[in-house]
Image: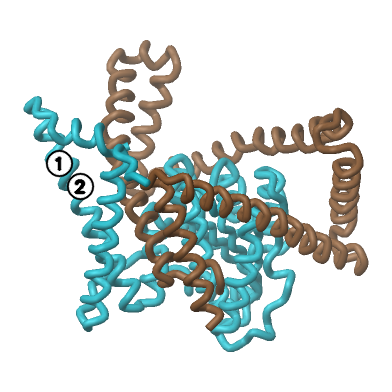
Chain colours: A cyan, B brown
Amino acid sequence: MSLVADRALGLVTLLLLFGAMYWQMQVAKGGKLPTIRRIAGLDAIPEAVGRATELGRPVHYSTGIGALDNEFGPQTLAGLGLLQYVSMLCAKYDTKIINTVCNPVVFPLSQEMVKSGYTEAGRPDAYTDDMVRFLSSEQFAYAGGAMGTMQREKVAANFMIGAFYAEALLIAEAGFQAGAIQVGSTARMYQLPFFVIVCDYVLIGEEMFAASAYVSREPDKLGALAGQDIGKVVSFLLIGLGAVLTTFKINVITDFLTKYGK
Amino acid sequence: MQRRYQTWIVAATAILMLCEQFVKSPGLAAAAKEVRNWGLIVAAFALGLGTVNLTMIHGDKISKKKEGWFNSLVLMAGLVVFAVTGIVLGTSHKTYSAMYDTTVSPMATALFGTLIFYIVSAGYRSFVIRRLESGVILASALIVMLAQIPVGRMISPVIPDAATWLQNIPNNAGQRGLVIGAAVGAVANGLRVMLGLERNFGG
């Protein structure tokens, strides 16, 4: 048993990030809660569900077509976290939610999140099996199904939070044509511009990972968020320092990262 | 109690998979491979669950002759025909491949082809100048689009250079900042799941 040498830096970075998060969680639990800036996209969620309630039309939610077992897994998980929150709001306001699913592994998790949202709102009996719909594991078959569902059911709010690919614009445009208020979020750079254009509110990149802490305001989660920010500050300091040193032809940081940072 | 067990199972699995990345050990590699195989089995069962859900929703639509029931009938027929052919002949059989290549594949390609109309429609809306930011987007987009066609260079030789600068400097800088933030966020999200702070997997 031995350590993989060229991944040592990754391990150290992970442990440091873990340490920073744990430290900030303890600070938050001690009563010193970190301040969190306003995120317009998250503030708009109750407003969008409220609008759907006023119009008497359903809400559509998609976690995208990302899997759970690859680099896009955290985005799908973040989408599932917000699905529970949106379901809770829908249950509270007595508005129907339609969650269309592409990835079969995500399907049972989506059912659990919607059920627990309804349970949290004190209305577990209002949950029905047709709220979470598996459409297809094929990308464009799913997109076609989601577009058709939104048009037929005339959704008044559309949430797209997760890992999206080329189907992002198709679904978002169908939402626009149905007259839905739209909140989009992804950390995939190629799809983000489409969301910015089509959606009313967008959670950009890391904002989707902060969503759970933002809506719950639990000290543990807020602390973990502050710890994560320490990681970001260190990353940006290293980038700045690396840029300055490399400009003066001192390659200490780049050589170190090349050797240990695979 | 059930929640606590779920959290422990998730934490143990995550630690095992992380250790496999950083530590060279035949035992760890074998255990991680086993967990991945379990994942494949779970995925197969999940696909079965999805099919049951699909059948329930569309079966109900057909039996009650709800609006669009004929589309549901076509979907169910397709599901049965593909499933029976795949089970009887195998998914690598030429009949199965021909069925896929003549139905699913062209339909997916056609839908992908419609994307251009959606891009134009969305692009038209976003290029309407309502405030300063929209103006900046329109000006940048015009420069980048003009640089892609010969007439751009004819209008001014500066246009291709300006487009390259726009893509390499402001666009790259913005993208990298977002990517780093999202990457740290994703790692932190994974750690929160490991610690049981995020329960996006078990309700």
Above-or-below relation of B185 to B30: below
Residue A116 appears left or right of A192: right
Residue A104 appears in the rendering: no
Label 1 in the same subunit as label 2:
yes
Q: Is residue B163 above or below residue B5?
A: above
Residue bearing the label numbered 2: A236
Callout 1–callout 2 Cβ contact below 8 Å: yes
Identify residue type, mark 2: Phe
Residue that sits furthest to the bottom in the current view: A122
The residue marked by circle 1 belongs to what chain? A
* Residue A200, x across and y down, in percent: 46, 58
Residue holding disc 1:
A240
Q: Which residue is farthest left?
A: A248
* Residue at the image point whose x is 61% and y is 59% from the top: A106
Residue A245 location (% of width, % of height): 9, 33
Residue A138 as seen in the image, left or right of residue B8: right
Judging depth in this view, the residue of A175 and A223 nearest the camera is A223
Tell me which residue sits at (43%, 71%) in the image. Answer: B196
